[in-house]
Image (cartoon, grey):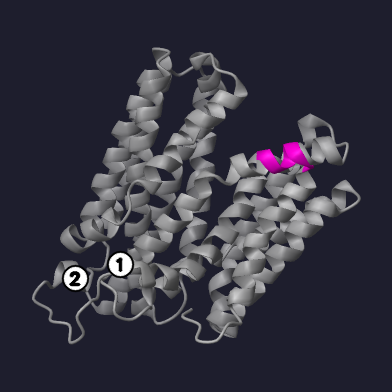
């Protein structure tokens, strides 16, 4: 098999891996209303319990990079998916037995595994992108969006049929593990994992505090994109219902439009990046996020608010892929270290995002809270014009 065929197969395999990673946790998210009722907790407490997933992800620190350098992306993605399946099963055991602590423990472990798999699949995506010599990572993130949608549909369908949570998660987990195992067989090898005798002329430096400062602007770029998803997931329906007088049963349209725009942006993002260049694409995406979020927060009517969310979804489509690409290109770091730490910084900051929005909204209003969150994108945009940029 020639190199071009291997690269094409690896591209498809990596997109499937991204879809699998989105499909596994999303299938439980679709049943969170049922989970909340079975645990018998109120909304505030449930919000704290489900934050355990992000706590587990933040606890991964630099583990993903270490595992990747030791075992390679094929082993890490497959074993990490199996780890997540077992962890989510543990969480469901906690649900069916009314044990919130067991539920939290399962989510912490699942979040840890998700962070590891996320870095591994992005590292493989960057390897495939390098083999093609053009931008591809954005379309691979579109694969994650497709997988999350499929997982959510499976969760909704099994809930409507009354399938017990444990049986649902066990069966879906097996499907996801097998899918990841099959797809990862076509992964391209990483130099560090596949050719340990390869000698680099420039030794990798340890990532100290100064290195984290270099990576922080890239983490802000990623966080700017993730903050749009957080506002859309948790607050877009509330904004339409409370501030724009949209009926509660119709208020979910804002999230649907945002995610649809994000999906389209990810499909078209690679061509846009290659056409205008990474820096121009990054500046454009952050600017569109700022305009879209502010429009959503302060537009005087529901249609304009929805248009604002659409713009924000379109803008955030390529921010995370661009941040990871920039981190991977930083010189002097150990393989996968840049992606690992940007991923960790992003996830660490995300833990407090929704509680912060709720707190600001309680003290002032939801439009003000969304405006405050938009400042992340504003700062990330301003940093693109600083001297001696590293992106």
The correct choice, above or below, for 28 with respect to 361 in the image is: above
| Magenta part of the chain | 358-365
Q: How busy is the neighbourhood of tag 2: few (under 14 within 10 Å), some, or many (20 plus)?
A: some
Q: 233 left or right of 207?
A: right
Name the secondary structure under disc 2.
Answer: helix
Across and down, in percent, residue 67 comes to 22, 56
Q: Nearer the viewer, residue 63 or 252?
A: 63
Q: Which residue is mark 2?
A: 192
What residue lies at 33% left-to-right and 71% top-to-bottom?
127
Indicate left or right for 215 with 356 as reference. left
Determine whether 241 is above or below 336 in the image.
above
C-alpha distance separating marks 1 and 2: 10 Å
Counting from the top left corner in percent of width and height, residue 52 is at 44, 35
Nearer-N-terminus badge (1/2): 2
Residue 115 in sight here: yes
- Principal SS element in the magenta part? helix
Residue 118 placement: quadrant: bottom left
- Characterize the local packing of mark 1: few (<14), some (14-19) or many (20 or more) Cα atoms within 10 angstroms: many
Q: What residue is rendered at 55% in x and 17% in y?
A: 41
Dot 1 corresponds to which residue?
336
Disc 1 + disc 2, Cβ < 8 Å: yes
Q: Residue at x 23, y 76 (%)?
A: 204
Query: Is 74 or 198 nearer to us in this picture?
Result: 198
Q: Is residue 156 above or below residue 217?
A: above
- Residue 280: say if magenta: no
- Looking at the image, residue 284 sits to the left or right of residue 218; the answer is right
Write the residue at 79% across / 53% down. 296
Residue 92 shows in this picture: no
Residue 108 placement, left or right of 296: left
Does the magenta portion include 362? yes
């Amino acid at each position: 098999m020639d190199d071009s065929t291997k690269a094409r197969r690896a591209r498809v395999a990596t997109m499937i891996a991204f879809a699998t990673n989105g499909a596994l946790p999303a299938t439980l998210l679709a049943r969170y209303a049922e989970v909340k009722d079975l645990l018998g907790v109120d909304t505030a407490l449930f919000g704290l319990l489900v934050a355990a997933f992000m706590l587990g992800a933040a606890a991964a620190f630099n583990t993903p990079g270490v595992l990747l350098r030791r075992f390679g992306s094929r082993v890490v993605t497959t074993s990490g998916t199996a780890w997540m399946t077992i962890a989510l099963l543990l969480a469901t055991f906690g649900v069916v037995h009314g044990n919130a602590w067991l539920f939290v423990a399962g989510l912490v472990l699942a979040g840890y595994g998700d962070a590891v798999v996320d870095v591994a699949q992005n590292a493989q995506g960057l390897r495939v992108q390098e083999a093609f010599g053009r931008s591809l990572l954005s379309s691979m993130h579109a694969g994650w969006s497709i997988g999350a949608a499929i997982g959510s549909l499976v969760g909704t369908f099994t809930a409507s049929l009354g399938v017990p949570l444990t049986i649902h998660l066990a069966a879906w987990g097996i499907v996801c593990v097998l899918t990841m195992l099959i797809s990862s067989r076509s992964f391209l090898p990483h130099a560090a994992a596949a050719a340990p005798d390869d000698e680099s002329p420039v030794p990798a430096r340890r990532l100290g505090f100064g290195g984290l400062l270099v990576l922080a602007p890239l983490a802000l770029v990623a966080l700017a994109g993730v903050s749009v998803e957080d506002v859309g997931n948790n607050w877009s329906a509330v904004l339409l219902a409370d501030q724009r007088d949209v009926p509660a049963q119709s208020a979910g349209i804002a999230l649907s439009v945002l995610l649809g725009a994000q999906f389209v942006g990810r499909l078209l993002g690679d061509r846009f990046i290659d056409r205008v260049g990474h820096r121009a694409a990054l500046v454009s995406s952050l600017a569109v996020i700022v305009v879209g979020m502010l429009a959503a927060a302060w537009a005087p009517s529901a249609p304009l608010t929805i248009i604002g969310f659409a713009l924000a979804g379109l803008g955030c489509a390529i921010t995370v892929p661009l941040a990871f690409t920039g981190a991977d290109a930083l010189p002097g770091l150990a393989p996968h270290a840049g992606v690992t730490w940007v991923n960790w910084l992003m996830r660490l900051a995300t833990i407090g995002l929704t509680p912060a929005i709720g707190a600001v909204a309680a003290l002032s209003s939801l439009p003000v809270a969304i405006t405050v969150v938009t400042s992340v994108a504003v700062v990330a945009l301003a940093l693109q014009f600083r001297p001696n940029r590293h992106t």
